[in-house]
Amino acid sequence: MRKLSFGKAINEALDQEMERDEKVFVLGEDVAKMGGDFGITRGLWKKYGDKRVKDTPLSEAAILGIANGAAMAGLRPVAEIMFADFITEGYDQLVNNSAKIHFMFNGTVTCPLVVRTANGAGFHAAYHHSQTPEAWFLNVPGLYIVAPSTPYEAKGLLIASIRDDNPVIFLEHKLLYEMEGEVPEEPYMVELGKARVRKEGKDATLIASQRMVYLALEAAEELSKEDIQVEVIDLRTLFPLDKDAIFDSVAKTGRVVLVNEAPKTGNYVNEISQTINEEMFEFLKAPIKRVTGLDAPTAFAPKLEEYYLPHKEDIIREVKEIVEY
């Protein structure tokens, strides 16, 4: 099978969905002729023109307001927010409009929009361009949150998101854009709300998403040299959460380490931890551990940014602690 980068897989998903359905259109800052700040929409403007690939003013509130109205009117907008940090500029549109429309109108009106946005640290982009925002939206019923880690999933999950009638926040980690993997040429969907077991094991469960999946896999490989077999779960969709996949693994291993690069306080993984405690407590052989970023802004200085982020060694340490518990 041919290989594509993560970014090109997203571009192909957009192209194939725009070709399939004329209701799909793209909007955002510099997404047209320039092709987006990361080049993800490159070539779409030339193929589909101004009506379906639209440059907008530098206003995230305007981008998401337009997307909301278009989705309610029957179109399927894919809005690009250049950096996830600035999604807060359109927070009211997402939280008080997109997320509630289906419920308010008893399903007679839907809001099938996708908000693509680049997130994550490790890019030396400093305080305002490095955050991981899923927890900001976790307390908002009605929003789907999707977070792929491979090119294959990036394409399949984006196609599924575009075809879904719910508003979707589609997170793309900046450090994954150049990663290559096998991607079929034909359109396909990866089901929303389904996690994937990336590595099987019996001694502990590592639960992660996006770039943290690769740290978890590296840690699992190191631990296997010491005869500690770790299971790695890639969440893929953060909401709705695939509790079945998590519970099956917890029942098998009885030990859990949750990995996320955002700060620990209020982190998305805290909800997963409490869910396991409430519903799978009798299976636990040790306390649930968390490996996260520090409770601090992401610094510009590379060494400070590195210090802020979770590391493979942190995961290994926590796994060993609960295995020996």
Image (cartoon, grey):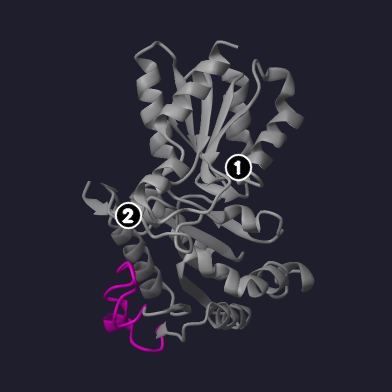
On residue 205, the disc is none
Question: Tag 1's secondary structure?
Answer: loop
x, y percent for residue 181: 28, 46
Quarter of the rendering containing residue 226:
top left
Q: Of discs 2 and 1, which sits in the foreground?
A: 1
In the rendered structure, which segment of residues is drawn in magenta? Answer: 31-53
Q: Earlier in the sequence, mark 2 or mark 1?
A: 2
Horizontal arrangement in the rendering, residue 323 relative to residue 42 (left or right): right
- Which quadrant is home to the C terminus? top right
Q: Which of these two is toward me, 151 or 31?
A: 31
Q: Which of these two is toward me, 89 or 98?
A: 89
Mark yes or no: residue 149 visible.
no
x, y percent for residue 63: 53, 80
Is 298 contained in the magenta span? no
Q: Which of these two is toward me, 23 or 80?
A: 80
Q: Amino acid at mark 2?
A: Phe
Is 44 contained in the magenta span? yes
Question: Tag 2's secondary structure?
Answer: helix
Is 79 situated above or below 157?
below
Quarter of the rendering containing residue 44:
bottom left
Residues at marks 2 and 1, CA–CA distance in whole angstroms: 28 Å
On residue 6, the disc is 2
